Image: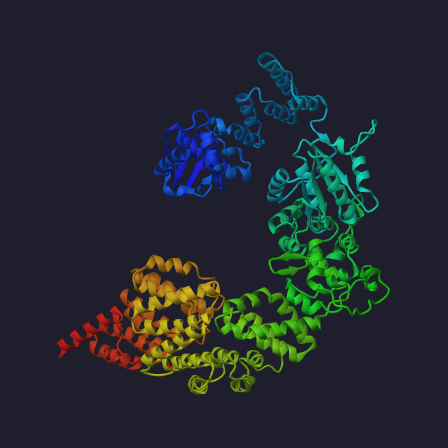
């Protein structure tokens, strides 16, 4: 990466290494290109600037030669050629300064004082806004009146009035002595400004209180006002538009604050703000080159817009900064939306206004108030009369809580309700009706959802919605005409009552509460829409459009929750449909087990809900039997996840084999792939000697899932396959498979968020240990989320134990394995606990504690004997054989190894097991 710094002596850095550019003309070429970073500089302009005094005979050829030399010096890619000229392809301090205005970027005179860059260097230096830099610039250009005038104003603003007058006297004398002229207009105007008592002209009110979280807004406004003459700040009432505008205006030499209200004529308000006018000077001619802040334009938006058109045309040096809940809508206007404070700055503002420590969840309070500064100020005032517990309990009823404010503030800002009443009054009847209906959405909605749920019957002139609900006496009549919902929605966005983010529209919670009070929301339509949406996208979760469907379920989670909550209370059939449509997403795709368990008891008549609700009770068997009759994907997965807690292991194996047979003939490719997956589970975990068949079945399932495009199923199948490969010692092949699983899982989100038999990260760490990458294993384990379930904690502890074992720290391995057993004391995962006992036996054997090791091997054998999992029993026997050898029983070890090979259905290629097998064979041969 190349960086070119020109705010001082030329500096070129290529990948952080300085590169020397020799030769005046070569340096000038780089400086000239850096004057216009990111833009093509015409060849004719370059030739004229680089050879101003002695143009070459063949200018284009000379320039091309110079460019070639520069490319050889700093890199061919740094300067690009174009039809009209050349462009610098490097970052520059000029660009950074344009964004940040940081004086720290300056190291001396800009552009090394190159003659073609003098004016640009001065222009940039004048933007520094630091007095030291301005003094240096003035010293370098003693006769530039614009620079000296700026220095005078800066000294005056810094309280150095006498120094400012001394600058004027010095420059006036120099102009007379050297040029024989007097001060020009700019210098004379600066002199008059300094002679006045005030350091700047205007009527800005002094700031009261601290100002938080608007640095980016201020920087953006400074940039916008430099390049545009009309900037409008829009945003919800109380969001801080006025305070932001005043803070921005305080940084300019002359600014006038004009507060508008519904009774004032904007031109008259501007004239009044300018103060006495004894000579009856026209209003616009009194403004000079000032900034006019027009505040609160929304109630007089048409006349405010007309004033701006006339003002900008008649006073060409004036700039306007307007605040309004909607844009003025005139040519040349640039709109800057003002958002609520982010949570961190909202907390700072609230804490500062309260002034004392409060024993409450301040972040929750600030989030509930949408980060709206006015709401935070009102809540801080209420904190003086309410206990922390009362404030926190009432914060979700914002409109009632924040019902009093400053006695001297504008009426529209004295309560939170007044803020929204003010905006409500600006709406026509159709806009009011749509806003009232939008309250049904939680977390926003797409335009399609708004149209489907809220679009019927919108038209102008709904009389019942002319006043807030608290003041209405009559019910709204039903509208018949259909308005264009998107146009109305756009109007509400323009008026800062609806927030648009990408393709979604949402209400601030404060506005949503107000909207719901109007009594126009239709939760039944809302439920119908979102049930249909969930049913439409549920099958897509198992195909190539899986990521698209996931985005929909995640984006609409709050609406789906709200719809389901209403349905379980009012419409049992819709509740069952919603439960069925959401289960795959919650149970399988995102592992939100607690949410499923929360909805299950609220959804009677749904087979899966009945299974989840009745687990651990006698009713579970009957519920599982009913679920058994279904062949929908939800039921299939639920059976695999829950039926082990209902049927015994032998019965479960038989049922899964029957299920695989049932699905094998399906015309649906996903179902056939799932059938192969189940066959793999039956062969691998419910059979003896069938590990090769399990491996083949998993590979068949993966082929099918890859054709279908189901990423989750691919990760699940790979996870199963990895367990088979690890069990037979194929670590390199297993690592290849788990690496694929991890890559695919990352497409779905975090690898640990995917429901699989074992965490992808944990599996990766186990395999890295066995291929000798202990550091990589540690890094992967560091990425594992804090496990919620005891079995998951146990797996992480087991892998840490394996890492200690293979690192030679057997005592640490014993400690970690014991913790894994403690974490899964109540678990039914017999295979897992058996392997942990066996691992303990291995570590204790290495420590020479053969008696304790034997106890754990016996526990492993006893525990695994309760399982039909042949490969798991094989692994336990192999580790038991290790102990038998240490005990001096190679013949018994050989028998254990032979039985393990039978249970697995083939030999184990794990180097440790191969070495043990060879040792046993050698010792048994010697015995003979």
**Left or right, 783 with reference to 277:** left
**Left or right, 405 with reference to 590:** right
Residue drawn at the location 67% of the way across and 31% of the way down: 253
Residue drawn at the location 42% of the way across and 81% of the way down: 678
Q: Which of 44 and 22 lies nearest the eye of the viewer? A: 44
Query: Among all residues in the image, which is located at the extreme front?
Result: 57
Query: Among all residues in the image, which is located at the extreme top?
Result: 177
**Left or right, 267 with reference to 112:** right
The image shows a total of numbered marks equal to: 0
Residue 458 sits in quarter: bottom right
Residue 56 sits in quarter: top left
The answer to whether residue 477 is above or below residue 273 is below
Residue 187 sits in quarter: top right
The answer to whether residue 521 is above or below residue 625 is above
The answer to whether residue 250 is above or below residue 639 is above
Where does the image place residue 806, in percent across and percent down from the top left? 30, 62
Q: Residue 670, can we see it?
A: yes
Q: Which of 807 and 546 lies nearest the eye of the viewer? A: 546
Where does the image place residue 884, in percent across and percent down from the top left? 25, 74
Where does the image place residue 189, in percent across and percent down from the top left? 68, 24
Q: Residue 757, can we see it?
A: no
Q: Which of 135 and 124 lies nearest the eye of the viewer? A: 124
Q: Quadrant of the N terminus?
A: top left
Where does the image place residue 48, in percent across and percent down from the top left? 47, 30
Looking at the picture, the colour scheme in use is rainbow
Q: Quadrant of the C terminus?
A: bottom left
């Amino acid at each position: 990466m190349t960086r070119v710094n020109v705010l001082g002596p030329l500096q070129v850095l290529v990948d952080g290494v300085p590169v020397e550019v020799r030769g005046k003309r070569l340096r000038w070429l780089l400086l000239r290109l850096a004057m216009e970073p990111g833009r093509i500089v015409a060849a004719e302009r370059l030739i004229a600037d680089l050879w101003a005094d002695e143009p070459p005979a063949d200018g284009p050829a000379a320039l091309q030669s110079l460019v070639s030399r520069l490319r050889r010096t700093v890199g061919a890619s740094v300067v690009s050629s174009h039809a009209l000229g050349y462009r610098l392809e490097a970052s520059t301090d000029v660009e950074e300064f344009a964004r940040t205005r940081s004086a720290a970027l300056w190291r001396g005179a800009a552009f090394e004082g190159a003659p073609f860059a003098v004016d640009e260097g001065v222009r940039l230096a004048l933007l520094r806004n630091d007095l030291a830099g301005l003094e240096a610039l003035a010293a370098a250009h003693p006769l530039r009146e614009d620079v000296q005038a700026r220095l005078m104003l800066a000294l005056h603003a810094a309280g150095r009035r006498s120094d400012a007058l001394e600058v004027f006297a010095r420059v006036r004398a120099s102009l007379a002595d050297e040029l024989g002229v007097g001060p020009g207009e700019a210098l004379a105007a600066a002199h008059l400004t300094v002679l006045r008592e005030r350091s700047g002209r205007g009527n800005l009110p002094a700031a009261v209180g601290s100002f938080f979280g608007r640095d980016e807004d201020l920087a953006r406004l400074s940039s916008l006002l430099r390049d545009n003459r009309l900037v409008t700040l829009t945003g919800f009432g109380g969001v801080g538009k006025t305070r932001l505008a005043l803070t921005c205006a305080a940084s300019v030499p002359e600014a006038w604050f004009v507060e508008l209200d519904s009774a004032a004529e904007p031109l008259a308000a501007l004239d009044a703000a300018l103060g006495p006018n004894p000579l009856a000077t026209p209003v616009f001619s009194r403004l000079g080159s000032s900034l006019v802040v027009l505040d609160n334009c929304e109630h007089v938006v048409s006349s405010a817009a007309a004033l701006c058109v006339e003002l900008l045309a008649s006073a060409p040096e004036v700039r306007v900064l307007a605040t309004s809940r909607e844009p003025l809508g005139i040519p040349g206007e640039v709109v800057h939306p003002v958002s609520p404070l982010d949570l961190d700055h909202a907390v700072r503002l609230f804490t500062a206004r309260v002034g004392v420590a409060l024993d409450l969840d301040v972040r929750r309070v600030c989030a509930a108030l949408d980060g709206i500064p006015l709401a935070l100020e009102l809540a801080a005032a209420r904190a003086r009369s309410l206990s922390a517990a009362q404030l926190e309990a009432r914060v979700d009823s914002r409109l009632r809580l924040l019902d009093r404010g400053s006695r001297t503030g504008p009426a529209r800002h004295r309560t939170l309700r007044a803020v929204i009443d003010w905006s409500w009054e600006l709406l026509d009847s159709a806009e009011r009706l749509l806003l009232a209906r939008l309250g049904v959405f939680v977390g926003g909605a797409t335009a399609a959802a708004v149209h489907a749920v809220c679009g019927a019957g919108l038209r102008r002139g709904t009389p019942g919605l002319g006043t807030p609900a608290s003041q209405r006496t009559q019910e709204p009549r039903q509208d018949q005409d259909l308005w264009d919902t998107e146009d109305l929605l756009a109007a509400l966005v323009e008026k800062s009552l609806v927030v648009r983010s990408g393709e979604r529209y949402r209400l601030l919670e404060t506005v949503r509460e107000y909207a719901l009070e109007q009594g126009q929301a239709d939760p039944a339509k809302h439920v119908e829409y979102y049930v249909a949406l969930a049913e439409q996208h549920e099958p897509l979760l198992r195909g190539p459009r899986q990521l698209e469907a996931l985005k929909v379920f995640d984006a609409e989670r709050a609406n789906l929750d709200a719809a389901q909550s209403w349905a379980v209370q009012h419409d049992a059939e819709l509740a069952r449909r919603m439960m069925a449509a959401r289960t795959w997403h919650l149970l399988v795709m995102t592992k939100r087990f607690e949410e499923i368990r929360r909805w299950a008891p609220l959804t009677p008549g749904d087979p899966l809900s009945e299974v989840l609700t009745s687990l651990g009770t006698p009713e579970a068997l009957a519920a599982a039997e009913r679920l058994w009759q279904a062949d929908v994907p939800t039921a299939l997965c639920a059976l695999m996840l829950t039926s082990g807690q209902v049927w015994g292991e032998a019965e479960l194996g038989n049922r899964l084999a029957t299920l695989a047979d049932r699905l094998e003939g399906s015309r649906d490719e996903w179902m056939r792939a799932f059938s192969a997956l189940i066959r793999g589970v039956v062969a691998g975990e419910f059979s003896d000697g069938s590990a090769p068949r399990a491996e083949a079945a998993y590979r068949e399932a993966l082929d099918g899932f890859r054709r279908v495009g189901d990423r989750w199923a691919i990760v699940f199948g790979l996870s199963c396959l990895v367990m088979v490969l690890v069990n037979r010692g194929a670590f390199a092949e297993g690592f290849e498979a788990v690496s694929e699983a991890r890559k695919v899982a990352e497409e779905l989100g975090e690898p640990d968020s995917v429901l699989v038999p074992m965490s992808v990260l944990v599996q990766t760490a186990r395999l890295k240990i066995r291929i000798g990458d202990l550091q990589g294993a540690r890094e992967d384990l560091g990425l594992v989320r804090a496990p919620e379930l005891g079995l998951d904690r146990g797996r992480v502890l087991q892998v840490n134990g394996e890492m200690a074992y293979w690192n030679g720290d057997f005592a640490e391995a014993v400690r970690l394995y014991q913790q894994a057993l403690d974490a899964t004391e109540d678990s039914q995962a017999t295979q897992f606990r058996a392997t942990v006992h066996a691992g303990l036996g291995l570590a204790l054997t290495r420590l020479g504690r053969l008696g304790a090791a034997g106890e754990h091997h016996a526990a492993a054998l006893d525990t695994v004997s309760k399982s039909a999992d042949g490969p798991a029993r094989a692994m336990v026997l192999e580790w038991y054989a290790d102990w038998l050898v240490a005990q001096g029983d190679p013949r018994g070890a050989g028998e254990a190894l032979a039985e393990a090979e039978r249970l697995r259905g083939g030999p184990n290629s794990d180097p440790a097991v191969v070495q043990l097998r060879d040792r046993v064979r050698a010792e048994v041969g010697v015995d003979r």
